[in-house]
């Protein structure tokens, strides 16, 4: 059976983003587990703030059409999601709102696995619950496990790997489960 295609991106485009570092660390582990990883940055798929009148005049932006195609092509997607005021980032919500305008939209076809990194102790877990609610509302299948990385300022080594063995272990378990479920959904 061919390798599971795993799309990975961060919900932050901030320079030095902890969640982009998480996406990088997860990408390396997923490759070691045999996944065919595509790690993208949402900075290459930006769209204006969703506005129905703008959409009526201009249609769905090409960036969103391209991102939707990547998602449809993938078996699964891992999102490293920051928490903003107990919810998902406006960048993620805007991207998802735009993707939901594609016909058919790509959420039913993709298995999701969530993680988050935060300087706080909780690793952005409330942001992931918010993101999960949005994805499930779009009929996506979302893995029950979620990877929380607290104390994010010291959570990653300079080479991009996890500084903490426990985080790497949790990530490996969640990724292995995600790839396994993706294979079963594909069968
Ligand atoms: C508007 C705003 C709201 C935030 N709210 C939370 C929060 O509710 N919980 C939390 O753990 N961190 C919160 N933070 C801190 C972020 O976790 C922190 O800025 C983090 O570095 C963002 O992710 P990034 O490094 O991937 O950009 C907030 C940051 C901003 C800018």
Image: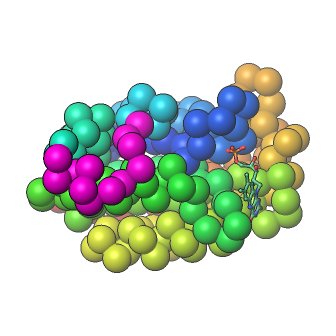
Q: In the rendered view of the protein, which quadrant contains the N terminus?
A: top left
Magenta span: 46-57
Q: Is residue 52 magenta?
A: yes
Colour setup of the view: rainbow
Q: Is residue 101 magenta?
A: no
Q: Quadrant of ligand 1?
A: bottom right
Question: Residue 126: percent from the left, percent from the top?
Answer: 66, 72
Residue at the spot x=58%, y=36% of the render?
13
Q: Relative to residue 149, is residue 24 depicted above or below?
A: above
Question: Residue 127: percent from the left, percent from the top?
Answer: 62, 66
Left or right: where 165 falls relative to 59? right
Residue at the spot x=26%, y=59% of the render?
52
Residue at the spot x=83%, y=52% of the render?
119
Q: In the rendered view of the protein, which quadrant contains the C terminus?
A: bottom left
Left or right: where 133 falls relative to 88? left
Question: Residue 128: percent from the left, percent from the top?
Answer: 58, 66
């Amino acid at each position: 059976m061919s390798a599971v295609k795993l799309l990975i991106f961060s919900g932050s485009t901030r320079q030095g983003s902890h969640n982009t570092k998480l996406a990088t660390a997860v990408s390396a582990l997923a490759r070691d587990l045999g996944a065919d990883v595509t790690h993208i940055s949402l900075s290459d798929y930006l769209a204006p703030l969703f506005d129905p009148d703008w959409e009526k005049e201009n249609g769905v932006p090409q960036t969103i059409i391209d991102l939707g195609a990547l998602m449809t092509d993938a078996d699964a997607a891992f999102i490293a999601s920051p928490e903003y005021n107990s919810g998902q980032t406006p960048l993620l919500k805007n991207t998802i709102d735009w993707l939901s305008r594609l016909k058919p939209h790509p959420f039913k076809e993709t298995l999701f696995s969530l993680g988050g990194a935060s300087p706080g102790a909780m690793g952005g877990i409330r942001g992931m619950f918010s993101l999960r609610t949005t994805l499930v509302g779009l009929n996506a299948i979302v893995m029950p496990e979620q990877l929380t990385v607290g104390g994010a300022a010291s959570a990653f080594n300079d080479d991009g790997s996890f500084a903490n063995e426990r985080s790497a272990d949790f990530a490996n378990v969640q990724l292995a489960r995600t790839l396994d479920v993706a294979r079963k959904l594909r069968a």
